[in-house]
């Protein structure tokens, strides 16, 4: 059975986060801690390469909301995730 687009995205994210969990510091952290480390590394990468993290995050949120079931719903309201800053 083929994976849906959402399932593929979850699988890719889990693969990346698994790498963080296997690092020397990562195995001591919760999955949420490893997620924070990944996000911090992405922020550093964006700073170093002059990519707009907030702009990319805002675009990703909009794409996620548009592609999620019930697209007109609260996809960005969970945990305060709907507040995006412009870069």
Image (tube, rainbow, N blue to C red):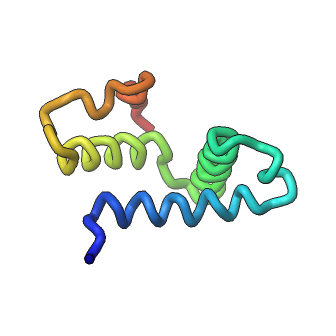
| Above-or-below relation of 47 to 24 | above
In the displayed orientation, state which residue is furthest to the bottom: 1
Q: Position of residue 20 (x, y in %)?
A: 70, 58
Residue 9 placement, left or right of 17: left
Q: Position of residue 17 (x, y in %)?
A: 61, 57
Which quarter shows the C terminus?
top left
Q: Is residue 47 visible?
A: no
Which quarter shows the N terminus?
bottom left
| Above-or-below relation of 25 to 65 | below
Q: Quadrant of residue 16?
A: bottom right
Residue 30 placement, left or right of 49: right
Residue 11 placement, left or right of 37: left
Residue drawn 15% across and 39% down? 71
Residue drawn 26% across and 76% down? 2
Q: Is residue 21 visible?
A: yes
In the displayed orientation, state which residue is furthest to the front: 1
Q: Position of residue 21 (x, y in %)?
A: 72, 56
| Above-or-below relation of 6 to 81 | below
Residue drawn 40% across and 34% down? 86
């Amino acid at each position: 059975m083929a994976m849906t687009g959402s399932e593929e995205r979850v699988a890719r994210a889990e693969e990346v986060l698994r790498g963080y969990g296997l690092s020397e510091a990562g195995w001591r952290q919760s999955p949420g801690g490893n997620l924070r480390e990944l996000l911090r590394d992405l922020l550093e990468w964006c700073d170093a390469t002059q990519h707009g993290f907030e702009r990319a995050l805002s675009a990703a949120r909009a794409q996620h909301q548009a592609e999620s079931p019930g697209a007109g719903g609260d996809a960005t309201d969970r945990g305060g995730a709907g507040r995006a800053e412009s870069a």
